[in-house]
Amino acid sequence: MTQFKEDNLPIEKLCTLVRDGPNVNKTIFTTLEKSIKEECPEFPGFVDLGSCILHTVHNAFGKGLEKLPLNIGQQCLDVHALFKHSAARREDYEKLQFQLDIDAHQFQQHTQVRWLSLGPAITRILEQWDALLIFVKDLGENSRTEPKSVNYRHVAALLKPDEKGATKVFLEFLKNAIPIFEEFLTLFQKTTPTVHLVYDGMCQTLMKLMCRFLKPDTVKGKFGGELSILSCDDVQIQLSDKDIVMGDDARGVLVKLGSDKQIIVMLGIRAFFCAAIIHLQHKLPLHNRLLKDLGCLNPQKLEYKSTQSAIQNIARKLQPNVDVSCALDEWKILQMDNNVAMINKEQIIEHYWNAIFALKSVANTVKYVVLPCIVKSGLVLAQMNAESERSLSINARVVTKERSALGDTTICGLRAVKDAVRFYDPVNNQPEKIVVTKEMKRYVRASSVAYQARLEDEKIAEKERREQAKQQSDEEDRLRRDKLQMVDKKKSLANDEKDLIEEKKEATSALKEADELLSDATQKLQGAINEPSMNQQSVKVASIMLDVSKTKREEAMQWLQKINEKQKMLDIKQRKLLDKAIPSNKNTKRKSADSESGLPKKKTK
């Protein structure tokens, strides 16, 4: 939503969100819808066409593969890896291909995360079957030179004399079944709108699988949501082993196997069909009414009477402000229009409808006024995310390892040029016929000037950034030095304070001793005076003690006074150090705040 706002896109006009099947995407769907409604109360909500059917069909094939007793996908990976990492094996295999008069083709690499990659890999293995058997057998004859890799052990285990027959049956069966899935995936990966073909396409794909596995009377007369209620794991409606469609090549290899192997193979094939069909029944949006109604935009269905109710439903769902009665009137006129019947129905869907909407009435005005917005609203919907997947692939081809330093502006410019070339001639796919005009040359020159200007701006910005970084680094060094100096001063002042405390204790102790001596001298003098016969010697001793105690007391008092003066000086130094530290922290905070806000620095006097 933040990106929508930055690009000034009207988020309330977002019509749908294409997604895969995981539940986390459903949560994103509902959360985003709720957020838009909170900001734009007039937002009608997303048009829900279900999850991407391309992923659903591809995953259905994967579910079927999981039920086979052999891991065919891994086998294709192992065969490719057996030759990929050894140039010597590739050379020996080429010699064997020449001896057996087999095409010198390399094995195809299967990628589990990409669509349509398993079919070519299986076809290549079957093409090289005889040579592969001989080559793997020769590799295992010498225990010293026999490969130790896991890939070789897997391939050798599946090509053993007692296993190679069943392996070939499954390969031939998949070679025969894959075209059903490939046809669907290829059709709906086109760049042109195909939403009007989705419902019929997924129903026909499901029916093809069912007809290969179930009795004809079970499937006959059923379409759409009715196909989802068939219980394909019911043995009563399944075909017998000899009637299941598995391909003549697979059947020819199957009859050469033993009865036990035939049972295992047929159970695996039945499990494949059951898993694939059940997955499609549960995951395909067979009950989506809008997706079914969008089929009325198919030129081949234009004359069907059922399309009249379908176009009304589309208008109510996608264009609630349009008068449905007017839309129905124009649709009926369109069905009876002889000029429409003369338009080529085999051209791409956008051009077909553009030709219809370009027709004029007898008053030389646009004949169809309401229908264009309804039809365009329907064709613009995307049920599959093939376009986004394709966009990621294009980005990967644009930003290669050698061009990883490209900026966002350059990447967007390259994508814009690629899209313009692709859309220039979508019918004949001949972008090389683009006419180079003077205006285009002017734009190219302008783009070069803009590019140079942007580079210059980037240089200036980089220079400013470096200067700012240097200033910041110098400021950090200065603050670090100041901090160290403050730490040293603080430590020195702490030591001085500690020394003063000890010195004060000593002075206090000396003053206490002088007071005690003065008290003793006073008592002794008083005692000598109070005696009947005054003892001159005692009086003299007491007088001396008094003089000594007074001298010591004065010295202690002077000592304490000096200590207090030192303490005052020490307090002044500590206060100055504290005053110096506090403004420094404030200035640091202010400078960091100014740098974050982008404000210019203020000069201090």
Image (cartoon, rainbow, N blue to C red):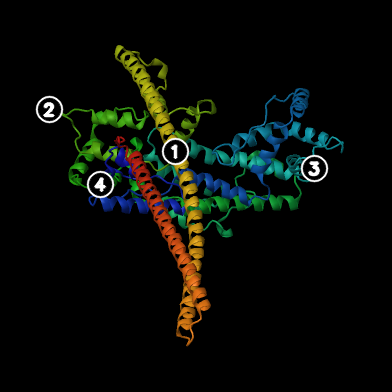
Please state which amino acid type lies under the numbered disc 1.
Arg
Q: Earlier in the sequence, mark 4 or mark 2?
A: 4
What's the CA distance linking mark 2 and mark 1? 84 Å
Residue 363's label in the rendered image is 2
Q: Tell which tag, 4 or 1, sits nearer the viewer.
A: 1
Going by the picture, which residue comes out furthest to the bottom? 532
Image vertical order of residue 47 relative to residue 120, above or below: below
In this image, 170 relative to 467: left or right? right
Pointers 4 and 2 in contact (CB under 8 A)?
no
In this image, 537 relative to 17: left or right? right
What's the CA distance linking mark 4 and mark 3? 64 Å
Residue 312's label in the rendered image is 4
In terms of depth relative to the viewer, which is nearer, 592 or 2?
A: 592
| Residue 430 horizontal/vertical position (percent) | 42, 19
| Residue 9 horizontal/vertical position (percent) | 28, 39
Quadrant location of the C terminus? top left
| Residue 149 horizontal/vertical position (percent) | 76, 40
- Residue 342 position by quadrant: top left
What's the CA distance linking mark 4 and mark 2? 27 Å
| Residue designated by label 1 | 478
What's the CA distance linking mark 4 and mark 1? 76 Å
Residue in view at x 50 percent, y 47 percent? 488
Mark 3 residue crowding within 10 angstroms, few (<14) / some (14–19) / many (20+): few
Residue in view at x 43 percent, y 57 percent? 562
Mark 1 residue crowding within 10 angstroms, few (<14) / some (14–19) / many (20+): few
| Residue designated by label 3 | 161
Please state which amino acid type lies under the numbered disc 3.
Pro
Mark 2 residue crowding within 10 angstroms, few (<14) / some (14–19) / many (20+): few
Q: Earlier in the sequence, mark 4 or mark 3?
A: 3
Image vertical order of residue 426 relative to residue 165, above or below: above
Q: Tell which tag, 1 or 3, sits nearer the viewer.
A: 1
Please state which amino acid type lies under the numbered disc 2.
Ala
